[in-house]
Image (cartoon, rainbow, N blue to C red):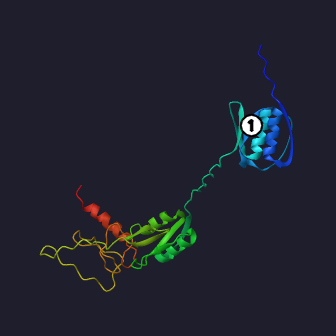
Amino acid sequence: MMFRRQETLITLESRGKDAREVFAELFAQAKVDFVLQVDIARPVYLTLRETPFLRALQLLCEATNTRYSVRDGVYYIAPLAAAPPPPPVQATERPRAVRLVGSGLTLRGVAAEISKQAGVKVTVSPDAPDLRFNLNLPSVSVEAALDALCDGTGLRWQKQGDGYVIAPSGTPQARPAAAPTAQTPPARPAPANPRTAPSRPVAPDQPLRCPKCRYALQLDWRYCPICGAYVKHLTDRAKREQEAQQPR
């Protein structure tokens, strides 16, 4: 039968003693050899009664921010290496939602409202037309709101530093009209007061024009990029007529 050696019980009382003196008293009671580093001097406050040696050593190391190791029966006491500070926790920034509801809102007014609600700078290029919008966006992200403003208006937005800028996407390229021939009558001059919609289908060789400023339009536009007139009902109608004329 094997008998386990009973561990030495330690009793320590310290009210501000130097840590080196407390370690020396601990190892003296345990009757073991030890080595202390000189830079662990600090006051210690503890009371241990009839505590097993290894448990008392662990508690004393925790109280003095030190560690122990054993080599060839000798206990070595050294300070703990300074642990690197934990990396700062970076909070995931959620995009702020904006509310844009109203009719007849100007482009620059909407940009200023987005800047106010979201706390980001939204600027409009000086050469951008002052379009007006009827918006019903109760809760959208900033970039979704910018998409709604630029969709089909000849505008584009891009990120600039910590904010955004809205600018024209470029001068629209209108399809040139065919030269008048004997078979193709020349286009009539525009009346003084243009109608809001063409009275008849637009010939395929003639560009669709804005009823307000007579600028040639493209079929995917909702607003005229020159005067800001709402032309989606015209472009939608022209697209339907163009599809109807295609052979099936």
Residue at point 44% right, 65% down? Answer: 147
Mark 1 neighbour density, 10 Å: few (under 14) some (14–19) many (20 or more): some
Q: How many marks?
A: 1
Considering depth in this image, is 3 or 225 the residue closer to the camera?
3
Residue 222 percent coordinates (x, y)? 39, 70
- Tag 1, which secondary structure? strand
Residue 185 percent coordinates (x, y)? 17, 77
Residue 156 percent coordinates (x, y)? 40, 68
Residue at point 38% right, 67% down? Answer: 152
Q: Does residue 217 appear to the left or right of 86 in the view shown?
A: left
Considering depth in this image, is 18 or 189 the residue closer to the camera?
18
Residue 224 percent coordinates (x, y)? 37, 75
Q: Does residue 170 appear to the left or right of 125 in the view shown?
A: left
Name above or below for residue 107 compared with residue 41.
below
Q: Quadrant of residue 5?
A: top right
Label 1 sits on residue:
34
Taking the view exactly as shown, the residue that stands out farthest to the bottom is 192
Residue at point 77% right, 16% down? Answer: 2
Q: Quadrant of the C terminus?
A: bottom left
Tag 1: residue type?
Phe
Q: Does residue 122 appear to the left or right of 212 in the view shown?
A: right
